[in-house]
Amino acid sequence: MTVSTLITAGIDMGTQSVKVVILKEGKIISRNQAFSGFNPKETAEKALTDALENANVPRTTINHITATGSGVEMAPNSDSTISMMGADAKAGVYLIPSARTIIDVGAEEARGVKCDSKGRMLNFVVNERCAAGAGAFIEAMARALEVELDEMGPLSLKAERASPINASCVIFGESDVVSLIHRQESKPEIARAIFDAMADRVSSMVHRLGISPDVVLIGGVAKDVGFVASLNRTLGLEVLVPENPEYTGALGAALVANKRAGDTKN
């Protein structure tokens, strides 16, 4: 088998879900996602198996599997690992070649990565271990506001203004939301306040790193139009969001696997 026909897999062992990407000839042929649950290793094994079945690719043809994510040590049968920041940089530039700053906002953590034109990580910054700067903050605030999670973004876009809330902690933020409800602020304005507060926190984190355009937003929260709008306002620029941003970590791992397998073959 030549390098051009290498089949590789990337597994992202996230806190809430496991993502898998399969590459053939450096192109995505399959992706899959599953809730991590109580046994992330078993979940990852099934997610990988399902992704391979979807692509009609036998497990024995995989040349290399690279794992990443917060639970990387639980990844099944991986041949190598890559840091989450390294995977972000590699995939970010693969998806958007002009990317030089990657912002990754997932369920429990946000991070910023600076990279070069080859997708090599140059520097990174991670938010404090608090869900206030990540997707869990939106989930908690949606419960306080008594709206569905997927309604939050579109709802926020209807607001013309936003009242400030405390995004330093989920508990404080929820208390502020309750206060706004008691003041009979409208739900759209409260929803926008939630996204603006979260965007402020993420923006402060990224400014510590330094912003070099183009700026690319990835991770599951990148699919939320409310957060994207707030982050654009806060940063004063338009962030670029690739297709399927939640799979970026797994894609980066698969790309690294492709490089490592190719180096072994040569």
Image (tube, rainbow, N blue to C red):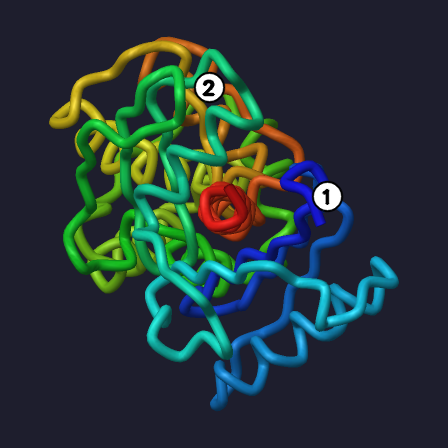
The residue that label 2 is drawn on is: 239
Label of residue 156 in the image = none
In the depicted view, which residue is nearer to us: 127 or 144? 127
Q: Residue furthest left?
A: 208
Q: Is residue 127 above or below residue 234?
A: below
Depth check, front residue: 233 or 156: 233
- The answer, for residue 262, to whether it is visible in the render is yes
Q: Amino acid at mark 2?
A: Val
Locate residue 64 relative to residue 163 in the image: left or right: right
Which residue is drawn at the image coordinates 54% and 49% (left, top)? 254
* Secondary structure beneath label 2: loop
Q: Amino acid at mark 1?
A: Thr
Label 1 crowd (10 A; few <14 / some 14-19 / many >=20): some
Residue 154: image location, x then y, percent: 64, 36
Compute the Cα span from label 2 to label 1.
34 Å
Q: Nearer the viewer, mark 2 or mark 1?
A: 1
Q: Where is mark 1, residue-wise?
A: 5
Q: Identify the residue at image location x=53%, y=62%.
A: 65
Residue found at x 47% / y 12%: 98
> For mark 2, does the 10 Å Cα neighbourhood hold few (<14), some (14 to 19), or many (20 or more) residues?
many
